[in-house]
Image (cartoon, grey):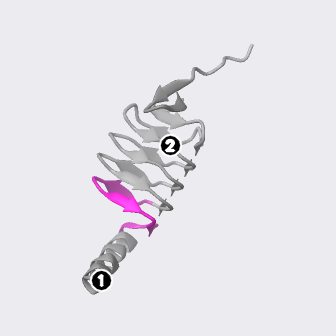
């Protein structure tokens, strides 16, 4: 007999507890079983999380974001929009919207570029 997973709600969103860690995963999100989703983490929207990625702490991954490879999203981090986080990147206490980050070095370059862009727009 196949065991039916219990549907849970968070902020009005239907989801399930992830089998690897117990964190909330919305029914609309695609999260592989190899991913670790910590008990307090939230994944919702049209998100895709795969590989050996970890989402834990009070982190949220939402919107159309992709997190894969050995990426770590944790602490109070929010990864959203069309963000793409991969490789061995570690995101913590940061909001990433529409960013493409695939290593710590590229994160530094992205932040430098963003700082210059904000300066130009002011």
- Looking at this view, name the residue that lies furthest to the right: 1
* Quadrant location of the C terminus in the rendered image: bottom left
**What is the spatial separation of the Cα atoms under label 2 and label 1, in whole angstroms?**
32 Å
Location of residue 94 with respect to 111 vertically, above or below: above
Look at the image and tell me whether residue 18 can be seen.
Answer: no
Q: Nearer the viewer, residue 26 or 68?
A: 26
> For numbered disc 1, what is the local secondary structure?
helix
Tell me residue 48's x, y (percent): 57, 50
Q: Which residue in the structure is indicated by mark 2?
A: 44
Location of residue 64 with respect to 2 vertically, above or below: below
- In the rendered structure, find residue 121 and report the number of the disc placed on it: 1
> For numbered disc 2, what is the local secondary structure?
loop
Q: Nearer the viewer, residue 49 or 81?
A: 81
Q: Please check the rendered image and state whether residue 11 is part of the magenta-colored stretch, yes or no.
A: no
How many other residues sit within 10 Å of disc 1, few (<14), some (14-19) or many (≥20)?
few
| Span of residues in magenta | 88-104
* Quadrant location of the N terminus in the rendered image: top right
């Amino acid at each position: 007999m196949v065991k039916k997973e219990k549907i849970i709600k968070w902020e009005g969103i239907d989801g399930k507890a992830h089998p690897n860690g117990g964190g909330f995963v919305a029914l609309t999100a695609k999260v592989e079983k190899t991913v670790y989703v910590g008990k307090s983490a939230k994944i919702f929207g049209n998100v895709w999380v795969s590989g050996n990625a970890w989402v834990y702490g009070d982190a949220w991954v939402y919107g159309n974001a992709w997190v894969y490879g050995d990426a770590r999203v944790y602490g109070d981090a929010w990864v959203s929009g069309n963000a793409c986080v991969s490789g061995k990147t570690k995101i913590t206490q940061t909001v990433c919207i529409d960013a493409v980050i695939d290593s710590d070095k590229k994160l530094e370059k992205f932040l430098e570029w963003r700082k210059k862009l904000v300066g130009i727009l002011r």
